[in-house]
Amino acid sequence: MGMTAADSQFHVLAVDDSLIDRKLIERLLKTSSYQVTTVDSGSKALEFLGWNGDVRSNPNENEISVSEKNSQEVEINLVITDYCMPGMTGYDLLKKMKESSSLRNIPVIIMSSENVPSRINRCLEEGAEEFFLKPVRLSDVDKLKPHIMKTKCSDIEKPEKEEKQENKESIETSSEIHLQKAQTSTSNTLL
């Protein structure tokens, strides 16, 4: 499946603790003209996406709290992550991203060498776009573009909706000014 030069603007973050699997997914993505950044853990992925890297334990519970930075320096169009990693699993990364207002719209693909239906369903229910079985193949990479395009289209629609709202507000304000002028001129005529 050929991709155009415009497709190379799509940037994928690949997350896997296995160097061999990271190199494989990187090669497949680059073969398909994607820009690729690879990291070896869920916490590094969150840091790259603009989250604060400080991981602190809540004294009342054994949860991990991660605070967000204000902005992401590099636009990532899709995250593909291994499920089974030490520390933060791919599922944990997915949950953190979907809980974040700034990251929830980035599509997430989970991959695993284990075909466990309950795990696959749990990831899809939590918001993963796809679940790939390893080894990832070029045919799997071909399935990524529709998810990226869906996000790109929603990013384009947002400014259009905001612009329409601004135009509507501008028209309403303009109408109110004309109405006030008409009322003022009518009251001046009566005086």
Image (cartoon, helix red, strand yellow):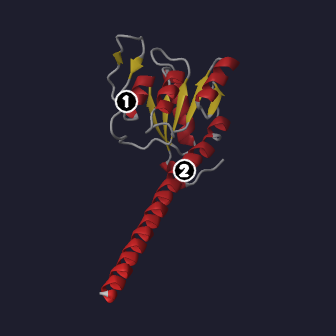
- Is 70 displayed left or right of 38 in the figure? left
Q: What amino acid does circle 1 point to?
A: Glu
Q: Mark 2 = which residue?
A: 154
Q: Mark 1 = which residue?
A: 47
Q: What amino acid does circle 2 point to?
A: Ser
Farthest-out residue, bottom:
189
Question: Disc 2 versus disc 1: distance between alpha carbons?
Answer: 25 Å
Identified at 46% across, 41% down, the residue is 76
Visible in this render: residue 171?
yes
* Location of residue 17 in the rendering, given as x and y in whole percent from the top left corner: 48, 20
The image quadrant of residue 119 is: top right
* Location of residue 47 in the rendering, given as x and y in whole percent from the top left corner: 37, 30
- For the residue pair 144 and 95, the one nearer the viewer reads as 95
- For the residue pair 57 and 181, the one nearer the viewer reads as 181
Residue 34 vs 21, above or below: the answer is below
- Is 67 displayed left or right of 168 in the figure? left
- For the residue pair 100 and 53, the one nearer the viewer reads as 100
* Location of residue 108 in the rendering, given as x and y in whole percent from the top left corner: 55, 34
Counting labels gives 2
For the C terminus, give its image quadrant: bottom left
- Is 138 displayed left or right of 73 in the figure? right
Q: What element carries label 2?
A: helix
Q: Residue 73 carries which label?
A: none
The image quadrant of residue 144 is: top right
Identified at 44% across, 70% down, the residue is 171
Of callouts 2 and 1, the N-terminal one: 1
* Location of residue 93 in the rendering, given as x and y in whole percent from the top left corner: 49, 25
Identified at 45% across, 24% down, the residue is 42
Q: Residues within 10 Å of mark 2 (few under 14, many from 20)?
A: few
Farthest-out residue, front:
191
Q: Is mark 1 on a helix, strand or loop?
A: helix
Residue 129 vs 177, above or below: the answer is above
